[in-house]
């Protein structure tokens, strides 16, 4: 089986090819390597191969492995891509450089409080539940633009982009198209969409970052 480093370079090549096919400029899409459930020994070779942008699902798991890695590799950019609980906001603001899962006013208010208290400002994305799945985090699409506005005007948060996770059993294309439409309406710049099985499709629909885990590190 190919190593994580080999699979990382394969993913980078596929991203570059998808950028070309979509008529987008080289380097337009950022690869977030999703390292959830993998330990530092698994992650370190990919860092040493030159990658510095990683995604984690849980604050507690990330706290166990990333502070030491960040000491050795100060250029690391860490993304929270799993749901944020309000009681973990303090830790999330301290550790993560990007929080992609802002999805309700309570979290927005807690983030604003912690950002002011810590003087540290992670970049923020609003997660949209494009499939309106009851078990999944994210704000309803019809409420997304108004929520982005509230984040800015009520909570004083700068929202950089939108993020989605399409339903596993549906064609992701319409979900990516919906997120791109909402991005325009909300007046934000970035789109985090596409995972191991569909990131090339996401690039065709305008993704500015893709979250690739199992295609790099293997199945969990």
Image: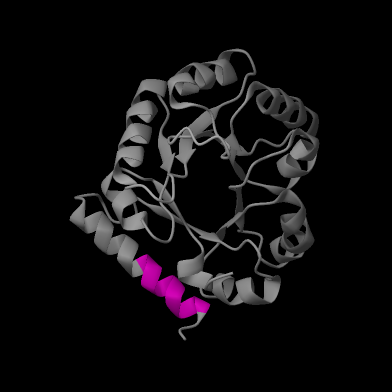
Q: How many marks?
A: 0
**Percent position (x, y) of residue 118?**
78, 34
Specify start and end residues of the magenta stretch as a single range: 4-12
Residue at figure coordinates x 25%, y 63% from the top left: 17
Which quadrant of the figure has residue 198? bottom left
Residue occupying the far top of the picture: 154
**Above or below — where is 212 with respect to 215?**
above
**Percent position (x, y) of residue 150?**
56, 16
Residue occupying the far bottom of the picture: 1
Is 21 within the magenta? Answer: no
Taking the image as shown, residue 166 lies to the left or right of residue 151, namely left
Taking the image as shown, residue 133 lies to the left or right of residue 64, namely left
Residue at figure coordinates x 55%, y 62% from the top left: 52
**Above or below — where is 199 with respect to 170?**
below
**Above or below — where is 159 with respect to 2?**
above
Residue at figure coordinates x 30%, y 39% from the top left: 174
Quarter placement of the C terminus = bottom right
**Percent position (x, y) of residue 143?**
48, 20
**Percent position (x, y) of residue 196?**
43, 61
**Above or below — where is 86 with respect to 216?**
above
């Amino acid at each position: 089986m190919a190593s994580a480093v080999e699979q990382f370079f394969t993913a980078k090549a596929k991203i570059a090819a998808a950028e070309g096919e979509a008529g987008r400029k080289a380097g337009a899409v950022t690869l977030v390597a999703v390292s959830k459930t993998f330990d530092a020994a698994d992650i370190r070779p990919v860092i040493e191969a030159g990658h510095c942008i990683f995604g984690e699902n849980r604050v507690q798991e990330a706290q166990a492995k990333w502070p030491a890695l960040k000491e050795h590799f100060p250029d690391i950019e860490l993304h929270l891509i799993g749901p944020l609980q309000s009681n973990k906001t303090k830790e999330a603001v301290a550790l993560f450089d990007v929080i992609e899962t802002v999805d309700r006013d309570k979290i927005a208010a807690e983030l604003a409080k912690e950002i002011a208290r810590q003087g540290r400002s992670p970049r923020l994305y609003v997660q949209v539940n494009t499939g309106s799945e009851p078990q999944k985090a994210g704000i309803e699409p019809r409420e997304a633009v108004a929520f982005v506005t509230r984040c800015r005007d009520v909570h004083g948060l700068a929202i950089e982009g939108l993020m989605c996770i399409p339903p596993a059993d549906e064609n992701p294309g319409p979900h990516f198209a919906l997120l791109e439409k909402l991005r325009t309406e909300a007046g934000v710049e970035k789109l985090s969409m596409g995972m191991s099985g569909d990131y090339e499709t996401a690039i065709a629909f305008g993704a500015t970052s893709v979250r690739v885990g199992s295609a790099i590190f293997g199945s969990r």
